[in-house]
Amino acid sequence: MLYLNIQQLHQRKFKVSQIAQELKVSRPTVYKYLKMTFEETKAYMEQLQGKGKKLDPYRDWIIAWLEEYPHLSAAQIHDWLLERYPDLVVGESTVRAYVKEIREIYQIE
């Protein structure tokens, strides 16, 4: 879906920064999808879905928190996860990357 939106806006002569702002994604994400074909994007998404991530079991919690409090930082989410799951061993950079990905997928500012 994101791939198609990026391609459509690009065909309508939007600049990369305008596409990024419109879709609430980063400019590197826009560049990445502009360089890919539809088949490459499909394979990329299948690869991502097949590979489990350490925070996937907590995905529903993270999405719920971000939808209710979109201003939350990844550090706050990290703290909340550790409060709720004291045995969880995860680095802040892992949480930061995961939260960034969730924000892009669900288009949460």
Image: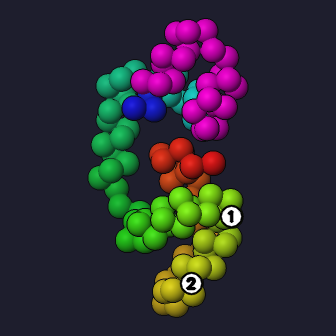
Q: Is residue 15 magenta?
A: yes
| Residue plotted at (34% across, 56% down) | 51
Does the image show residue 35?
no
How far across and how far down the image is residue 34, in percent? 52, 22
How far across and how far down the image is residue 69, in percent? 61, 63
- The residue range painted magenta reads 4-27
Q: What residue occupies the far bottom of the structure in this picture?
A: 86
Residue type indicated by callout 2:
Leu
| Residue plotted at (47% across, 25% down) | 5
Q: Circle 2 sits in a helix, a strand or a loop, which is it?
A: helix
Please tell me whether residue 109 is drawn above or below residue 81 in the rendered image.
Answer: above
The residue labelled by disc 2 is 82
Which disc number belongs to residue 21? none
| Residue plotted at (66% across, 31% down) | 21
| Residue plotted at (54% across, 79% down) | 81
Q: What residue occupies the far front of the structure in this picture?
A: 68
Foreground: 99 or 53? 99
Foreground: 77 or 64? 64
For the stretch drawn in magenta, the main secondary structure is helix
Residue type indicated by callout 1:
Ser
- Of circles 1 and 2, the one toward us is 1
Question: Would residue 90 be found to the left or right of residue 74 on screen?
Answer: left
Q: Quadrant of the N terminus?
A: top left
Location of residue 75 (image quadrant): bottom right
Please tell me whether residue 18 is drawn above or below residue 70 in the rendered image.
Answer: above
The residue labelled by disc 1 is 73
Location of residue 25 (image quadrant): top right
Q: Circle 1 sits in a helix, a strand or a loop, which is it?
A: loop
Crowd rating for badge 1 (residues with CA inside 10 Å; few <14, some 14–19, many 20+): some
Sequence-first disc among 1 and 2 = 1
